Structure formats: structure tokens, C-alpha cells
Image (cartoon, coloured by chain):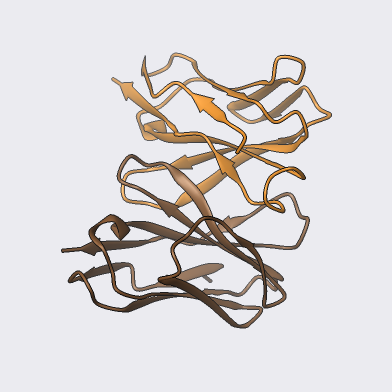
Chain colours: A brown, B orange
Amino acid sequence: DTAVSQTPKYLVTQMGNDKSIKCEQNLGHDTMYWYKQDSKKFLKIMFSYNNKELIINETVPNRFSPKSPDKAHLNLHINSLELGDSAVYFCASSQWNADTQYFGPGTRLTVL
Amino acid sequence: GEDVEQSLFLSVREGDSSVINCTYTDSSSTYLYWYKQEPGAGLQLLTYIFSNMDMKQDQRLTVLLNKKDKHLSLRIADTQTGDSAIYFCAETSNSNSEYALNFGKGTSLLVTP
């Protein structure tokens, strides 16, 4: 059973398009995260949701809009995609204030 | 934000021990982690240590924490070719964004036969 799953695994699209990445966790956690890993492998937090409420919103462009329909899902919608958005996006989940975050397999986004 | 620094590359021979080092600046770090990322794969939590501990051992892995110097290390005993990967040091604290992981840039470990 996959604990944290993301779809799609790969996403190739043109500049200017709008796309969504989905994340689901079946661990019963109440907190979910989106991280971005750039071409140099540097990982940085983007967003965090706790019980469907936005907790963290790092300096991410407004074109990125997370949505959490319920505690088990955190989706990431990106408008007007730019070349610099090409990266691997990782979803993670945890219990609030817990010591461990569990990561999904990542979504490799390529913007042409 | 607070910094987490790691050396970028390490090469060892199969069977030797590997030591990957990490330094951090946030004195209120609560947990410190080591994650492994194999090529094209996701992040695998290897081990973590609470900031009031100085050592943790888990099979071939030994984590040492020097809180005074803000230095964390990961020792892999009897390194195998399957250990070749990128190893990320990360920390959480109350001073960064509510338990988000703050990662170093990763150390690429190459294990040669």
C-alpha cells in the first residue's frame, strides 16, 4: 500500500499552460506539505497545510495555488507555467508536531 | 532563513566506512534528519536524532550530534555500491516555518567497487 502518492509522476507541458499535481496520503496524518527540488537538487518547502488550513506559504509566486479538499489530499495548481518552474515537486505528510514526514515519489515537471 | 551546509561529494571504496558531515546554524533545532535519494527516486528517511541526544545507532548507520558545534554526521559502516545516492541533512525547529524541513544541498556519495 502506498503511503503518500502523487500523480502524475511525469508532466511535460508548454510555457503558459495551467497544470495540477495531486497528492494523497493514507496514513491518517493531519498535515501535508509541498516541497520543490530544483535542477541542482536543492529542496525547499513551498506550502504546508494542517487540517485543511494553510500554515506555511513560503515566498512562492501567486501562480502556485495549493488546495486541500480534505485532510488526506493536497493538490498543487500552477497557472501560467514558466521555464523556471521545471523541477521535481514532492508531497509529504505527517502528524502535526510529529518527528517524521513521509514523502511521496515526486512529480517531475518539465516546462518547454 | 537558517542554513544547513553539507559537502557536495564523497567517494569511498566498497567495504570502507563513509562519513557524511553536516553543519547547521539554528540553535533551536529540535530534530535532525538524514534522508537518502537514489537517482530518479523519492526521499527515503534513513534516520533522525532528537537534539538532546548525541548519538544514535541503527544497524550500519551511526548518527553523531555535537550540539555545541552544531555538527551532525552520518557514518555508514561497510559501505556497499547500493549506498550510492544523495544524502540530505535536514532539520526542523520552532524558529523555522512550523516544522517544515530545512534541507542541506545534499552530499552525493559514490561507492566504487
Does residue A93 lie above or below B66 as drawn? below
From the viewer's perspective, is A39 left or right of A98?
left
Q: Which of A75 and A59 is in front in this view?
A: A59
Q: In which quarter of the image is residue A51?
A: bottom right
Residue furthest to the right in view is: B52
Q: Identify the image quadrant of the C terminus of chain A.
A: bottom left
Q: Quadrant of residue A109?
A: bottom left
Residue furthest to the bottom in view is: A69
Report x, y in % for residue A1.
Answer: 53, 71
Report x, y in % for residue A57.
Answer: 58, 62
Residue under the point 26% across and 69% down: A11
From the viewer's perspective, is A4 left or right of B38?
right
Does residue A17 lie above or below B53 as drawn? below
Q: Which of A18 and A28 is in front in this view?
A: A18
Residue under the point 71% across and 71% down: A30
Report x, y in % for residue A3.
Answer: 56, 67
From the viewer's perspective, is B58 left or right of B36?
right
From the viewer's perspective, is A17 left or right of A41?
left
Residue under the point 77% across and 45% down: B94
Q: How many marks?
A: 0
Report x, y in % for residue B89.
Answer: 55, 34
Does residue B51 lie above or below B112 as drawn? below
Q: Quadrant of residue A47?
A: bottom right
